[in-house]
Image (cartoon, grey):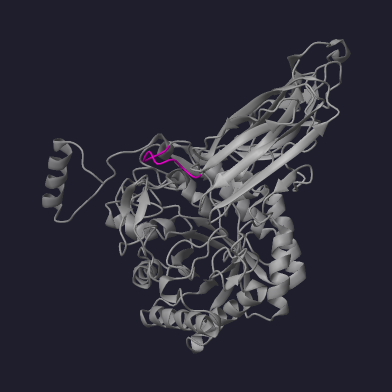
């Protein structure tokens, strides 16, 4: 960290010279480090429950000047801080050869060159062995996460390592087995043999594409290995673990998927994997509430997996934000989790509660071994980003503040047992408590009905509890004469919870009727529309992080040039002015992207260009259509280049008043 102020420099110099050793203290502290939080213990939690964290970025952060400070404000080894706060496992991602195989250009500027380290931790074998030694010294167990790639591997990308790009079939399987075996032998020789390994990372659609790709995603996916190819690679990886040495049989093997609440996905993969008798021990799941939904979905899936396959399970990725703030002006990969029944406030308290609830959810299932928090030490340090030349998009989900000071929320790994209370030097604290009370109402309930119609007011409303979680509580609504409301307007109705809180419901009375039956694609299909294009590239996608409302949206993406049109024709319309509108977000840069309307009684095709500027930067676009022939065709046109992606959601077509 940079030093500020001559006085501080002089004081530090005097302290060092007078005491004979270097003493460092945190120079800056955020309000987040001063938070006072409480955690409800998880009853019956096993002492050997895995309370893990992925700290793969640490070596790069420290190399670039980052440092970590304990609750006393003193510089300390991050592994020792984690251990003291209840962490007992460390997860490390491993890339084969993390260097660029091409120049990385953004906005016409080369941000890193071919042959440069890729960034994102640069987690080579040597880097991970050094981290593993520190973890073992702190008394922590190790989960090694083989990505089988030179860079990030996840459901959207599973690129072969550059060294293996020309390998396929048996040659690729041999390379996977040999790399797995020799890597583990190097760890063993260094005295840091992993206790557990993942053979692949978030392999929803396989790994090492195209050989291990299960399902086609783009129109160029005509020569993929399918499920058989994926299983062959898994068997090779597993064999590499088991044959690394006599000790290889003691290492637990994980097969890891994302989307931890999607039971159909897990059944599809693990039905095939178990039928093929792949040698593995544990099912790994990723579960981020803001992407994957409620913990009820996670536990339901885990219970089914346990019953169906008899395997143990670990949530190997989970995280939540402690602030909306951004520590390095990069923008953060976080969206608020708040559905109809649950939610968490992005605060130090909310972060701790989310982790506590994840632990409770996993431990409630037979065979639920533990959970890992993803990158709690990824503080904002210039250059320590997703790739070389970028900064962090994760700093608000760390468990250290922007200056490296440990947050009270890290104590959750102790407090789930009712121990490990902390009081830090900045006035922050963490303690255990048996229950929480509601202290404020959540956002207003919003409904849309026709004038004169009685709205379906909910029997329960969300309120915020003192652990910064949002939960449903019963509510009694005030009386209102809805029959007498004959005009378009918004009526605010009040209700009272059992605890005496006043909550509100905003009822929009509108004579505007959306003629689309499934405006938010929540059916999971495009059945209401006509698609001129590949259904592999254009489809209804379930992903809360890419939906404007609900969990589904109309999604497009390809790694090559592509185009498509989604349209719908309305007939039997009353002539007049109509509005066609939609919300859009995406990466931008398409050759053409627009809404259109045609065949409405004039030869002109009406269009409005869509200009997307980033993930979750939603914008509304609309057309006004003078229908004179009782019909109209409306829709979306995408003319994309390689890598373009985007989403449309909350589409409306209605007659204007």
- Which corner quadrant of the image does residue 221 belong to? bottom right
Q: Residue at x 57, y 45 (%)?
A: 639
Q: Nearer the viewer, residue 377 or 501?
A: 377
In the rendered view, does 209 fall on the left or right side of 528?
left
Count of numbered badges drawn on the protein: 0
Q: In the image as oriented, which residue stretches furthest toward the bottom?
A: 246
Q: Residue at x 45, y 80 (%)?
A: 179
Q: Against 582, is 400 above or below?
A: below
**Residue 126 at x, y = what percent?**
34, 72
Is the magenta region chiefly helix, strand or loop? loop
Q: Against 555, is 234 above or below?
A: below
Quadrant for the C terminus in the image: top right
**Residue 566 at x, y = what percent?**
69, 43
- Which corner quadrant of the image does residue 28 belong to? top left
Residue 507 visible to an observer of this rendering: yes
Q: Against 526, is 136 above or below?
A: below
Q: Nearer the viewer, residue 451 or 402?
A: 451
In the rendered view, does 422 fall on the left or right side of 646?
left
**Residue 29 at x, y = what percent?**
34, 38
**Residue 165 at x, y = what percent?**
45, 73
Residue 258 within the segment the image draws in magenta: no
**Residue span colored magenta:** 326-333
Q: Against 1, is 437 above or below?
A: above
Q: Nearer the viewer, residue 640 or 489?
A: 640
Q: In the image as oriented, which residue stretches furthest toward the front?
A: 603
Q: In the image as oriented, which residue stretches furthest toward the right?
A: 483
Q: Nearer the viewer, residue 217 or 591?
A: 591
Residue 551 visible to an observer of this rendering: no
In the rendered view, does 591 fall on the left or right side of 544?
left
């Amino acid at each position: 960290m940079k030093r500020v102020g001559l006085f501080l420099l002089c004081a530090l110099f005097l302290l060092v010279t007078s005491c004979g050793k270097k003493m460092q203290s945190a120079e800056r502290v955020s309000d987040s480090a001063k938070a006072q939080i409480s955690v409800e213990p998880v009853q019956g939690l096993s002492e050997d429950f895995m309370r893990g964290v992925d700290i793969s970025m640490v070596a790069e952060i420290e190399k670039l000047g980052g440092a970590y400070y304990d609750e006393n404000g003193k510089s300390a080894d991050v592994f020792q801080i984690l251990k003291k706060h209840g962490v007992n496992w460390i997860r490390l991602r491993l890339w084969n050869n993390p260097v660029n195989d091409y120049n990385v250009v953004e906005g016409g500027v080369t941000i890193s060159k071919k042959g440069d380290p890729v960034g994102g931790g640069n987690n080579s074998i040597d880097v991970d062995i050094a981290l593993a030694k520190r973890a073992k010294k702190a008394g922590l167990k190790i989960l090694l996460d083989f990505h089988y790639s030179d860079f990030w591997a996840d459901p959207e990308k599973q690129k072969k390592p550059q060294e293996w790009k020309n390998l396929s079939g048996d040659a690729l399987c041999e390379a996977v087995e040999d790399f797995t075996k020799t890597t583990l032998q190097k760890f063993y020789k260094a005295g840091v043999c992993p206790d557990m390994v993942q053979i692949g990372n978030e392999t929803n659609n396989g790994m090492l594409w195209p050989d291990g790709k299960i399902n086609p995603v783009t129109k160029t996916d005509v020569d993929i290995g399918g499920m058989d190819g994926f299983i062959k690679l898994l068997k090779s990886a597993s064999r590499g673990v088991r044959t690394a040495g006599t000790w290889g049989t003691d290492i637990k093997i994980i097969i890891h998927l994302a989307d931890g609440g999607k039971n159909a996905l897990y059944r599809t993969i693990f039905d095939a994997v178990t039928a093929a008798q792949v040698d593995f021990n544990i099912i790994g799941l990723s579960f981020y509430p803001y992407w994957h939904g409620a913990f009820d979905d996670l536990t339901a899936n885990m219970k089914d997996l346990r019953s169906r396959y008899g395997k143990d399970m670990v949530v190997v990725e989970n995280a939540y934000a402690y602030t909306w703030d951004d520590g390095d002006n990069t923008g953060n990969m976080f969206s608020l989790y708040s559905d109809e029944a649950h939610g968490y406030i992005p605060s130090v308290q909310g972060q701790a509660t989310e982790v506590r609830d994840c632990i409770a959810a996993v431990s409630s299932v037979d065979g639920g071994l533990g959970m890992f928090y993803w990158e709690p030490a990824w503080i904002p340090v210039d250059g320590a980003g997703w790739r070389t030349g970028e900064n962090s998009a994760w700093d608000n989900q760390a468990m250290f503040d922007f200056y490296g000071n440990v947050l009270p929320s890290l104590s959750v790994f102790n407090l789930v047992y009712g121990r490990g209370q902390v009081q830090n030097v900045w006035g922050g604290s963490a303690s255990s408590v048996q229950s929480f009370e509601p202290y404020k109402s959540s956002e207003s309930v919003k409904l849309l009905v026709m004038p004169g119609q009685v709205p379906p007011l909910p029997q329960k409303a969300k309120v915020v509890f003192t652990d910064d979680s949002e939960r449903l509580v019963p509510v009694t609504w005030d009386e209102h004469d809805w029959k007498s409301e004959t005009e378009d307007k918004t009526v605010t109705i009040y209700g009272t919870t059992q605890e005496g809180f006043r909550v509100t419901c905003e009822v929009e009375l509108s004579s505007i009727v959306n003629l689309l039956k499934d405006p938010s694609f929540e059916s999971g299909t495009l059945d209401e529309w006509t698609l001129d294009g590949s259904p592999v590239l254009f489809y209804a996608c379930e992903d809360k992080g890419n939906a404007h409302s609900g969990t589904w949206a109309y999604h497009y993406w390809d790694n090559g040039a592509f185009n498509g049109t989604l349209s719908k024709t309305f007939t039997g319309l009353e002539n007049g002015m109509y509005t066609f509108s939609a919300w859009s977000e995406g990466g931008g840069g398409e050759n053409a992207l627009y809404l259109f309307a045609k065949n409405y009684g004039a030869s002109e095709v009406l269009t409005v260009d869509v200009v997307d500027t980033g993930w979750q930067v939603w914008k509304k676009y609309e057309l006004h259509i003078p229908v004179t022939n009782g019909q109209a065709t409306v829709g979306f046109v995408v003319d994309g280049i390689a890598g373009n992606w985007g989403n449309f959601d909350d589409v409306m077509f209605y007659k204007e008043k």
